[in-house]
Image (tube, helix red, strand yellow):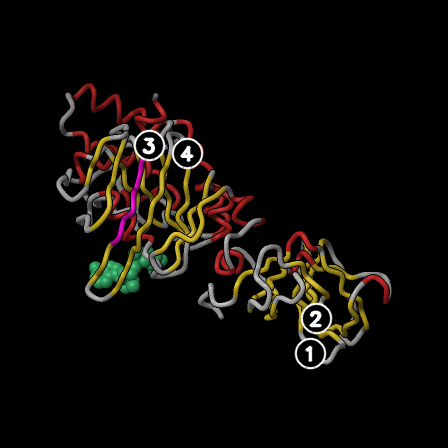
Amino acid sequence: MARELNDLALEHLSHRFDQTIAVDDASLTVGAGEVVALVGPSGCGKTTLLRVAAGLEPLQQGRVLIGGEVMADDRTAVPPEERNVGLVFQDYALFPHLTVRGNIAFGLKHLTTSERDNQVSQALERTGMAGYASIYPHQLSGGQQQRVALARAIAPRPRIVLLDEPFSGLDASLRHRVRDQAAQILRESGIATLIVTHDPEEAMYLADRIAVLDRGRIRQVGTPDDIYLKPADGFVAAFFGDVNRFAGRVSDGYVAIPLGAVATNGHAEGTAVDVLVRPEALSLGNGPDSGVPGSVLAARFLGRSSLVDVRLKDSSATTVRIHLAGRQLPDAGETVYVARDSNQTYVFPSGDDPKN
Ligand code: ATP
């Protein structure tokens, strides 16, 4: 029951700015205590979707429900301040002339003084900022400002928190720490959290489920495992990691690529397809029987893994990228044998991916 009360449901949202279709028939739900990441390249409509959900952008088409109640449809438009939604933006948007306490108390004017003090103190505790209540935003580090923004968003005890690129202003090491804490606070508070990011790794790391947006359309919604290991299309596969890409045509249920024959499962005979092979699905075999021969172009050590580029010694002279665990650095010019794991090989009809 509690879960249902806290859910955010976006149903068939579409949104235009003049000729630009920013959001195109997008549907998504977020459960209580669930963190859903909305991810996609710049301009794909992430912020617009979030703003429509919050009521900051008037709804054009579709429906927004919070806790099962309609917040916006063709007849209803509940104003943002009555949606019980907390917002955290990239720039934190803290009021410079108010102390940390003043910033957090700002949205609680409707409460009695003691209720307000109580909720502000709780939000400060939760975010680990209790010792900073009387200082001003400019006296805080970026990570601390981010935590105040989060405290301000959760202080009114919202059902939903919407975050737009909240960690992108922080340097890498701080970003990891702050986002861990933020996700934990939001999960523990039972809040339904929708977080916008353009960073696929951040989405994989933080989210229970990920929604992948491309030119306004949701391409896939799934767990990080699903999205990475069972991408719905070439766009999702390529957005979530490097891929080696081959074009081919289905013949007798297979498509021939320079790395061997790939089963095409269900694609009609003669269909033009793209075969996507993750660099980590490739490895270096021991001899001619273990893989396709190639010549090493370059090998780089990345610390925990190595990247090896190999030009295949067939008529295609295709270059493939191989991602190997640990330090494995064959010499440039060395002959190697490239083996392929069929598990991370994906076949999609060609043309379903803007990178084609
Ligand atoms: P980014 O990651 O770069 O912030 P985004 O995925 O959040 O991008 P949106 O900001 O939602 O994308 O923009 C989606 C599309 O709508 C873009 O083509 C953008 O130019 C357009 N757009 C957004 N806001 C407006 C506006 N107020 N007026 C006109 N066009 C807009």
List the residue tagged with mark 4.
Answer: 34
Magenta stretch, overall SS: strand
Mark 4: give few (<14), some (14-19) or many (20+) Cα within 10 Å: many
Question: Sequence order check: which comes first, mark 1 or mark 3?
Answer: 3
* Span shown in magenta: 7-14
Residue type at mark 1?
Ser
Of labels 2 and 1, earlier in sequence is 2
Q: CA distance from mark 1 to mark 3?
A: 52 Å
Disc 1 and disc 3 in contact, CB within 8 angstroms? no
Label 4, secondary structure: give it: loop
Residue at (33, 53) in percent of width and height: 46
Q: Mark 2 sits on what residue? A: 258
Task: Tell me which amino acid carries mark 2.
Answer: Pro
- Discs 2, 1 touching: Cβ within 8 Å: yes
**Can you identify the residue that label 3 sits on?**
7
Question: Dot 1: what SS?
Answer: loop
Crowdedness of circle 2 by 10 Å Cα count: few (<14), some, many (20+)?
A: some
